[in-house]
């Protein structure tokens, strides 16, 4: 077994806040860190990402064999940056990306990952919005809170969501939502089957789905479907 640890240290840039995605957090951005790491993805089969508070963006790129990780951190005080790290490590054919933050609500990290095609992606996200686009490979995402948006993905998508809206647009592959606590679900242009195990609250809409549509349990909210070519199963 090959174990490789790649430390990524963050450097303080300035005391002002230039992070567009973190400006929504009010006046708490008094100190920032940033880091950028580029890795050779040859030989990798899986990427595992673990993030906490902040925005997560994952973009697939079919023209490259490298993987790029960028982290931007915003904190209410510079002392919190000492406990902040974007850690990248590799074990065999799996790459791990971990956003490490102090246990407070005043530090957040935006993480941007650009990855080549053909990798299995597994994501665990604490809070904050998630955008996944142009990825070619299977995806498993477990999200505690925040909106999820997936666009132009080729591969099976599996989601487990606590709260926040879900939008899946232009997917080639099956879409499975194991559980959704609260928030709307919108699924459009899905070339595959759709399965929603359990939905707590919020409207569900599905449009232009080439396969079956299955909903196991629905707590509250309307269900609206258009142009479902397969079998529709509702509770």
Image (cartoon, helix red, strand yellow):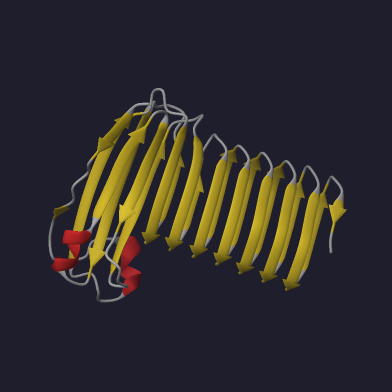
Say which residue appears at 66% left-offset and 55% top-offset: 178
Determine which quarter of the picture holds residue 137: top right
Q: Residue furthest front?
A: 1
Determine which quarter of the picture holds residue 149: bottom right
- Is 96 located above or below residue 108 in the figure? above
Q: Position of residue 177 (x, y in %)?
A: 66, 54
Determine whether, in the image, residue 1 is placed left or right of residue 76: right
- Is 44 located above or below residue 157 in the figure? above
Residue 16, visible in the rendered structure:
no
Determine whether, in the image, residue 70 is placed left or right of residue 15: right
Q: Position of residue 120 (x, y in %)?
A: 52, 36
Name the residue nearer the viewer: 198 or 146: 198
Determine whether, in the image, residue 154 is placed left or right of residue 192: left
Say which residue appears at 28% left-offset and 46% top-offset: 87
Determine which quarter of the picture holds residue 204: bottom right
Residue 224, visible in the rendered structure:
yes
Q: Position of residue 207 (x, y in %)?
A: 74, 53
């Amino acid at each position: 077994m090959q174990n490789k640890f790649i430390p990524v240290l963050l450097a303080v840039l300035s005391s002002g806040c230039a992070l567009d995605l973190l400006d929504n957090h009010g006046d708490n951005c008094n100190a920032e860190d940033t880091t950028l790491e580029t890795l050779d993805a040859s030989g990798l089969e899986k990427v595992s990402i673990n993030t906490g508070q902040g925005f997560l963006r994952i973009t697939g790129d079919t023209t490259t064999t490298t993987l790029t990780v960028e982290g931007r951190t915003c904190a209410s005080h510079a002392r919190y940056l000492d406990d902040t790290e974007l850690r990248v490590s590799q074990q065999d054919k799996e790459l791990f990306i971990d956003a490490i933050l102090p246990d407070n609500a005043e530090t957040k990290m935006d993480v941007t990952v650009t990855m080549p095609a053909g990798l299995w992606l597994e994501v665990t996200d604490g809070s904050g919005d998630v955008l996944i686009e142009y990825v070619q490979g299977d995806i498993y995402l477990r999200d505690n809170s925040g909106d999820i948006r997936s666009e132009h993905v080729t591969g099976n998508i599996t989601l487990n969501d606590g709260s926040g809206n879900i939008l899946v647009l232009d997917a080639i592959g099956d879409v499975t939502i194991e559980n959704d606590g609260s928030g709307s679900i919108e699924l459009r242009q899905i070339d595959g089957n759709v399965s929603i195990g359990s939905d707590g609250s919020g409207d569900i809409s599905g449009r232009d789905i080439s396969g079956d549509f299955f909903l196991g349990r629905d707590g509250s909210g309307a269900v609206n479907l258009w142009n479902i070519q397969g079998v529709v199963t509702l509770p």
